[in-house]
């Protein structure tokens, strides 16, 4: 019997929020508010943890005047977290009263005594035992690209990436030229990264017809309103993301790209898979497993976290510090440095390359780099590592779109490496 027929997948049970932190702040809010004024406490905790309205966290505490529309969004998120927490049996909710269940109390106590990582793992167990959503995610990913360890790509190219200026699209009727160039680039990326040849011309024509039908472009393919430029570029991006999800990768049990994103970004927090939207040399989102579903693995590099009714287990790739990490780190640095004129290169880019090569999570990379850096300070490492903070993320953006790398409790974002000729 096919494995997909043995488990009852319920992927629609997850609600529209990304971070497991939301479960914690709801449980904490109910505990502290004693069942009343829970929303106000939830809102305060949300701001204290810099949780934004997306898959990214805010940079530091940002003073905001709470508008009516923002308050409505807070209420919406609150309602989503409440609904999923009720489904998981963490809380009881009636009217404007909220009460922690025994499960909810236990989970909150786990956070206090064991920290967020164990809290997240216990939440994972609750979610997976109801939905088997992560199982569906991983098995579908691996089925799509067995030759490259389950790597999936969602290429995304703005007009500028393909050398089309806004002026050309708005004033020179180059929009269809951009769409045709984009279609060709997407086919190239699918072949390069997934190893399959697909013809996207029919889908491209369907996209053009839809844009004409909705009135965003006219029958001669001119943009009707230059003010809708950003909207139309977003529509194009969303169309292809959805097409890849359904028609190329065959995620039939996931009803939208937004639902898919909820699952994959939650899986990233657990270390089940990794995602990068900034992989050097690629434009778009790259997703790959950092775990495997298997009957039995004896290797100490894999940590068992769940057993399925089918007799399979979910193992996370959790390697110990070794020479292979150092080799990968140094090779990736040299690889990037060739295209740079400076001694230091972007540490986040190094992380993306190393994590992809070794199929490890961002957190595991930080742990291994911290261990390497300690040995480096003692002079016992085969390479010499220099880590610095160029500009802090707070100097660049409102949202932190790449996970910060903490070494010795401080954010580091540039790195330089050379062979240690004075190794002790």
Image: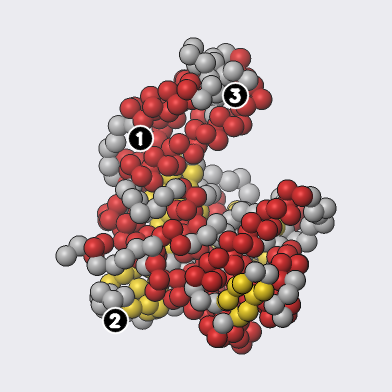
Residue at 45% x, 36% y: name it: 239
Q: Quadrant of residue 300?
A: bottom left
Q: CA distance from mark 3 to mark 1?
A: 22 Å
Residue at 41% x, 33% y: name it: 185
Query: In this orientation, does residue 375 appear?
Result: no
Kindly identify which numbered label has been placed on residue 165.
3
Q: Categorize mark 2 by other alpha carbons within 10 Å: few (<14), some (14-19), many (20+).
A: few
Q: CA distance from mark 2 to mark 1?
A: 39 Å
Residue at 74% x, 54% y: name it: 71
Q: From what the image shows, is residue 46 above or below residue 275?
A: below
Residue on which disc 2 sits: 298
Image marks 2 and 3: residues in contact by CB distance under 8 Å = no
Among the two numbered marks 3 and 1 on one chain, the one whose residue lies closer to the N terminus:
3
Residue at 35% x, 35% y: name it: 187
For the view shown, which residue lies furthest in the left direction?
Answer: 1
Q: From what the image shows, is residue 137 above or below residue 295?
A: above
Query: In this orientation, does residue 88 appear?
Result: yes
Please tell me how many numbered marks the rendered image carries.
3
Question: Where does the N terminus fall, quadrant-wise?
Answer: bottom left
Q: Secondary structure at mark 2?
A: loop
Q: Quadrant of residue 146?
A: bottom left
Q: CA distance from mark 2 to mark 3?
A: 55 Å
In the displayed structure, does residue 291 sit left or right of residue 294?
right
For the view shown, which residue lies furthest in the front direction?
Answer: 95
**Residue 199 % position (x, y):** 30, 32
Residue on which disc 1 sits: 187
Nearest the viewer among 286 and 97 is 97
Among the two numbered marks 2 and 1 on one chain, the one whose residue lies closer to the N terminus:
1
Q: Secondary structure at mark 1?
A: helix
Q: From what the image shows, is residue 235 above or below residue 382?
A: above
In the displayed structure, does residue 206 sit left or right of residue 198?
right
Nearest the viewer among 336 and 301 is 301
């Amino acid at each position: 019997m096919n494995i997909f027929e043995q488990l009852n997948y319920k992927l629609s049970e997850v609600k529209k929020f990304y971070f497991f932190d939301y479960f914690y702040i709801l449980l904490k809010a109910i505990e502290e508010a004693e069942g009343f004024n829970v929303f106000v406490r939830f809102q305060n905790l949300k701001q204290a943890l810099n949780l934004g309205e997306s898959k990214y966290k805010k940079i530091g505490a940002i003073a905001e005047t709470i508008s009516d529309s923002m308050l409505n969004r807070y209420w919406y998120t609150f309602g989503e977290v409440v609904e999923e927490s009720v489904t998981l049996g963490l809380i009881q909710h009636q009217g404007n009263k909220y009460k922690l269940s025994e499960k909810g109390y236990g989970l909150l106590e786990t956070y206090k005594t064991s920290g967020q990582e164990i809290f997240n793992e216990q939440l994972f167990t609750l979610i997976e035992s109801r939905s088997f959503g992560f199982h569906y995610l991983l098995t579908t990913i691996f089925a799509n690209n067995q030759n490259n360890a389950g790597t999936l790509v969602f290429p995304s190219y703005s007009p500028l990436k393909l050398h089309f200026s806004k002026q050309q699209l708005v004033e020179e009727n180059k929009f269809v030229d951009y769409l045709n160039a984009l279609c060709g680039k997407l086919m190239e990326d699918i072949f390069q990264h997934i190893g399959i040849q697909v013809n996207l011309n029919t889908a491209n024509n369907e996209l053009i017809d839809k844009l004409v039908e909705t009135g965003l472009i006219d029958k001669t393919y001119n943009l009707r309103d230059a003010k809708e430029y950003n909207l139309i570029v977003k529509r194009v991006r969303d169309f292809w993301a959805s097409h890849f999800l359904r028609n190329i990768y065959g995620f039939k049990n996931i009803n939208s790209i937004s639902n898919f994103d909820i699952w994959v970004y939650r899986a990233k927090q657990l270390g089940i898979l990794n995602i990068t939207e900034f992989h050097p040399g690629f434009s778009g989102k790259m997703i790959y497993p950092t775990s495997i579903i298997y009957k039995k693995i004896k290797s100490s590099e894999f940590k068992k976290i769940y057993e399925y009714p089918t007799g399979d287990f979910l193992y996370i790739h959790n390697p110990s510090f070794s020479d292979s990490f150092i080799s990968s780190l140094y090779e990736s640095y040299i690889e990037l440095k060739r295209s740079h004129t400076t001694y230091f290169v972007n540490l986040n880019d190094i992380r993306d390359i190393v994590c992809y090569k070794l199929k490890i999570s961002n957190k595991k990379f930080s742990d291994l780099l911290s261990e390497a850096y300690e040995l480096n300070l003692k002079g016992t490492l085969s390479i010499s590592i220099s880590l610095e903070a160029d500009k802090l993320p707070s100097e660049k953006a409102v949202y932190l779109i790449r996970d910060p790398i903490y070494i010795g409790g401080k954010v580091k974002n540039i790195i330089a490496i050379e062979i240690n000729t004075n190794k002790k």
